[in-house]
């Protein structure tokens, strides 16, 4: 099966945080990064092509592209120094730098690619360790790998694992540090949570990027106890409320408030504060909750109905921002149960 000539890897887009669940919660969406792969005869060079989001900017050199760079890193820890001869066609509908987990999906795709191309036979739990060596926060990579609505945490690393060279890194794309070594095991822990299928996700995606690294740089190192309690109370209620039918929109909306990351990021996303205040279950029936998607700038509205009107209301707030307004598009997405997968065929 694994030696079949062709295989296809699919990895869903994700939204992380979901309000109070900063670096904890994430969900997988019905929007897939795909890699169509074909094994080539021994001695052939890697052939890589790419269509979709990022096509103009994403490098197609194996050592530079985040997908293949991640695959090379994984293979290197198995003593394999190059990618086996492959033709890879990447199709990417996930906008880059918008808070829909494009880098997490690319990292997951790289680990899954290494597993398939190198016949490594890794479990998904082991793949998670590798993903976390490249992208440090688990809230995108865990749902991209496993699917669904996921809560995750990292185990505390011991002193020797905290040696600089061993620290799993976030945002691999913009630092030039040496490759991390073979990961220790069980870095990440996760659980798939219940999700009420009546709730869909509206992603309103503005036409500018916010690099996750920049959106993390604006956060404080230390928080007030009251703010931590505020988020802990809400996250516990939110995870249960999102699994219940009938949907309690008022409770979900209140439980999606956050004091840990959104207030510090609001200046990076013009209009976000107005959106969080104005788009409520009362003003727009069908709304269940609203938050920044990941590190932004996409706005995520959870809703049961009235999707186009709600999306238009968010878009109108982007449009009325100073200096000519901000253009946006929107996608109405399902939360999908399946995560990354590899299909083999002739
Ligand atoms: N499909 C992809 N192929 C290669 N690199 C990618 C891909 N998707 C994302 N990246 C890299 O990840 C960066 C975006 O990461 P990040 O700032 O974390 O935003 P996001 O919120 O989209 O994950 C891009 O600038 C690019 O370097
Ligand atoms: N918890 C992270 C999530 C980043 O998600 P992304 O999709 O914006 O990369 C954060 O909020 O920094």
Image (cartoon, grey):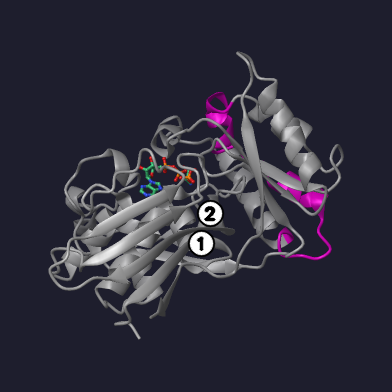
Res 156 visible: no
Q: Are marks 2 and 1 in contact (CB under 8 Å)?
A: yes
Label 2 Cα crowd, 10 Å radius (few <14 / some 14-19 / many 20+): many
Q: Which mark is residue 143?
A: 1
24 versus 272 height, above or below: below
Q: Quadrant of the N terminus?
A: bottom left
Residue ranking furthest to the top: 323
> On the image, which quarter does residue 244 sit in?
bottom right
> On the image, which quarter does residue 342 sit in?
bottom left
Res 117 visible: yes
Does the magenta run of residues contain 258?
yes
* Coordinates of residue 286 in the picture (x, y in percent): 83, 48
SS for dot 2: strand
For the residues labelled 2 and 1, the Cα–Cα distance comes to: 7 Å
Q: Nearer the viewer, residue 139 or 234?
A: 139
Q: Is mark 2 within 8 Å of ligand 2?
A: yes
Q: Is residue 195 left or right of residue 198?
A: left
**Residue at mark 2:** 14
For the point 77% across and 47% down, the residue is 307
Q: Nearer the viewer, residue 172 or 264?
A: 172
Label 1 Cα crowd, 10 Å radius (few <14 / some 14-19 / many 20+): many
Span of residues in magenta = 241-269
Q: Is residue 260 left or right of residue 67?
A: right
327 versus 29 height, above or below: above
Q: Is mark 1 within 8 Å of ligand 2?
A: no
* Coordinates of residue 120 in the picture (x, y in percent): 26, 77
Does the magenta run of residues contain 271?
no
SS for dot 1: helix
* Coordinates of residue 121 in the picture (x, y in percent): 30, 79
* Coordinates of residue 51 in the picture (x, y in percent): 43, 50
> On the image, which quarter does residue 203 sit in?
top right
């Amino acid at each position: 099966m694994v030696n079949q000539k062709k295989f296809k890897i699919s990895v869903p887009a994700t939204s992380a945080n979901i309000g109070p669940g900063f670096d904890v919660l994430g969900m997988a969406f019905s929007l897939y990064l795909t890699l169509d792969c074909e094994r080539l005869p021994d001695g052939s060079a890697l052939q890589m092509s790419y269509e979709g989001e990022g096509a103009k900017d994403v490098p197609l050199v194996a050592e530079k592209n985040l997908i293949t760079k991640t695959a090379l890193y994984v293979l290197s820890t198995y003593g394999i120094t190059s990618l086996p001869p492959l033709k890879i066609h990447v199709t990417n509908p996930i906008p880059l730098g918008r808070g829909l987990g494009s880098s997490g999906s690319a990292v997951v795709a790289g680990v899954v690619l290494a597993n398939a191309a190198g016949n490594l036979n890794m479990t998904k739990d082991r793949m998670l360790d590798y993903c976390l060596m490249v992208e440090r926060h688990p809230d995108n990579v865990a749902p991209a790998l496993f699917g669904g609505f996921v809560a995750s945490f990292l185990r505390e690393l011991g002193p020797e694992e905290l040696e600089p060279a061993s620290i799993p890194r976030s945002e691999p794309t913009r630092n030039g540090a040496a490759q991390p070594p073979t990961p220790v095991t069980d870095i990440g822990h996760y659980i798939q949570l219940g999700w009420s299928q009546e709730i869909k996700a509206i992603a309103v995606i503005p036409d500018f990027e916010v690099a996750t690294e920049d959106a993390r740089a604006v956060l404080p190192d230390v928080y007030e106890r009251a703010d931590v309690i505020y988020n802990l109370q809400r996250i516990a209620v939110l995870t249960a409320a999102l699994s219940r039918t009938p949907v309690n929109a008022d409770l979900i909306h209140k439980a999606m408030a956050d004091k840990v990351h959104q207030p510090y990021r609001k200046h990076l996303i013009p209009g976000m504060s107005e959106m969080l205040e104005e788009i409520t279950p009362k003003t727009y029936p069908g709304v269940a909750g609203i938050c920044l998607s990941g590190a932004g700038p996409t706005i995520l509205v959870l809703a049961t109905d009235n999707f186009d009107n709600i999306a238009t209301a968010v878009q109108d707030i982007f449009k009325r921002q100073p200096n000519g307004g901000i253009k946006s598009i929107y996608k109405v997405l399902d939360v999908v149960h399946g995560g990354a997968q590899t299909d083999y065929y002739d």
